[in-house]
Amino acid sequence: MRVHFHPLVTGNELLTPMIIGPFFFLTVGGIYTVIQTKAKTTADEWGENYFLIGPYFEHNVKTQVEQCEPMNDAVRKAVDAMNQHGCQVHFGRWLIEGSPYVVLFDIGYSAWNLDRWKGDFWEACNVGIPYNDREANDMLIFGSLTAWFLKEVTDHADGKHVIAQFHEWQAGTGLILSRARKLPIATIFTTHATLLGRYLCAANIDFYNHLDKFNIDKEAGERQIYHRYCMERASVHCAHVFTTVSEITAIEAEHMLKRKPDVITPNGLNVKKFSAVHEFQNLHAMYKARIQDFVRGHFYGHLDFDLEKTLFFFIAGRYEFSNKGADIFLESLSRLNFLLRMHKSNVTAVVFFIMPAKTNNFNVETLKGQAVRKQLWDTVHSMKEKFGKKLYDALLRGEIPDMNDILDRDDLTIMKRAIFSTQRQSLPPVTTHNMIDDSTDPILSTIRRIGLFNNRADRVKVILHPEFLSSTSPLLPMDYEEFVRGCHLGVFPSYYEPWGYTPAECTVMGIPSVTTNLSGFGCFMQEHVADPTAYGIYIVDRRFCSPDDSCNQLTQFLYGFCKQSRRQRIIQRNRTERLSDLLDWRYLGRYYQHARHLTLSRAFPDKFHMEPTSPPATEGFKYPRPSSVPPSPAGSQASTPQSSDVEDENEDERYDEEEEAERDRLNIKSPFSLSHAPRGKKKLHGEYKN
């Protein structure tokens, strides 16, 4: 049967399969957020022929997987055959949106085959795995089981074509063994970040400036990951199609792995729109009030700043001080504090660092602050009820009450005691927990150097929360999504960020964010949005600027944000939220579709081919710069900061939200197709290490 590939469908509707005939699509391994969020779109496209393959962990399966029998005959026979030959294969539905089928291999149950499978792997690609690298050994077992499973499926597929997409080096052994055994499957290998790239950037090496100068084998050997690097590189070169998540990672992969990606497959999210257009604005106000409550307790005794004129910034993610940009962020905060104080601004920025580190308990002073706040709140409520009853009785008698009658001596005593209870001799703590490595912690050490100790005169206050957020926390009882919605700006000035889910999540929730041109997300937004800043996406240049210039640019972004009026921030949040269509898997899924089509044409050239008209380049597809005032909220501001609650009726009078929104909705549906690989002339590498 000869199958033709149709030109890609345009529009924002869910895309249906564009291949005629029966297929299996299997995803092996992968980044959790990518696979989980993409599951519904992929399951809608492939239906009962979509399967996820991964390792079996009992504690996860009990709460996240509904075990069942395979309905597909080929998969059922493959599972039964492996179970009959000494394996333990579990099958079920993953209890997430889309409910995809999952095939899970118990690695420990098959560990007795490790030595034999090491020999098979050596014969396949001449890569040996040290006995003391447990993760690599486990991944070899997993890969061997995956290749075995694919062999059983293809033996019983009855002419159906199998497409297998392998994510990251951990899943790559299954791809290598499948190609070595010449299984009739079409293979895709996707790297979300190169293994060696992560190691080099973690060592504060001038990475992007020396991409073409590294001795790859030497660098991998010195870090004792040479065998892992070989596994990753072999996977890349064995695959029919190689993909990565961003153009910046594609450049990295071309030098680190010696193969240029065939397709860029950006990461998306499963975007849910509210039926009420401005519901995300209401959620922002609600969760901001909860953050304000925490701040009241944390800064008790030093709450001499107006919470209505206070902005909440945050950075979140793995504790990688340089890779995640915490170093440049702290330096920028020091400069921002100087600017706000010099201009005598009444705006305060409270900055949260949500980065998990080793702790031994909550900070006693932080717990005390929340206890004092709650006690004061209870006192006020009890007095309010008492005052209300006296006022009610007086009004019923037709009298205007004398305040001396409303407030007696005992009431004044209670209020004075409440005031005394909120006094403190020490400064509000910088961290909410007791840090185990307090003296050497990079964030705390930098805070000591730049002197941001939450003094009264400081307009920038810093709070390090060294664990992930949870609604069960006694300090800040909020989930991460709730916290993000309550903040004003997410700041992620990463040096090494192959994609960047944190700014993408902010965008989907209508919260402006700072990213860089060294992150996949930042590059994607630069390509698709004519004026990212107007849409609340601030992109710091960390590729072609010196560290000091990048820091100054970030400082100006933060200072400009502090100068915005409340109305300007609302306008910007509306624009930011509209960008969520760009990040929806229903839109980005077409990149993966193109990768699968290309894979089939390479794996089965006698049966499939790409239409000569596809894929043209993505020229001309961009969100336009908003024509309303201000085109960029920082562009029409006075030289000194404004109050965040000032409302100027004449300000931004040409802003027509409905007109802008309709234009953006039409623009996202403009016809465009996909390119095989990063477009344009190869760019120069960064000139500075930030």
Image (tube, rainbow, N blue to C red):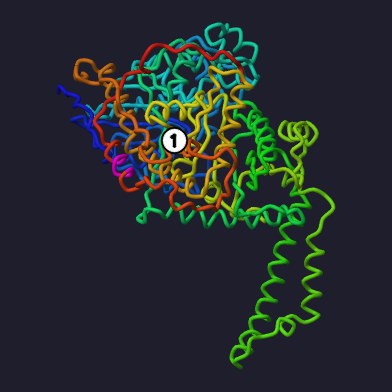
Q: What stretch is highlighted in magenta?
A: 660-665
Amino acid on which disc 1 is placed: Val
Q: Which residue is drawn at 74% across and 35% down?
A: 447
Q: Tell which residue pokes out farthest to the right in this image.
A: 425
Q: In which quarter of the image is the N terminus?
A: top left
Tell me which corner region of the image, top left, top right, bottom left or bottom right, holds residue 338: top right
Magenta segment's dominant SS is helix
Residue nearest the observer in this picture, 437 or 423? 423
As drawn, 349 above or below 87 = below
Residue denoted by label 1: 34
Verify whether residue 603 appears in magenta: no
Question: Does residue 143 appear anywhere in the picture?
Answer: no
Q: Residue at x 54, y 42 (%)?
A: 489
Residue nearest the observer in this picture, 89 or 228? 228
Tell me which corner region of the image, top left, top right, bottom left or bottom right, holds residue 344: top right
Verify whether residue 663 appears in magenta: yes
What x and y, as percent, mark residue 621?
A: 31, 28
Under circle 1, the secondary element is helix
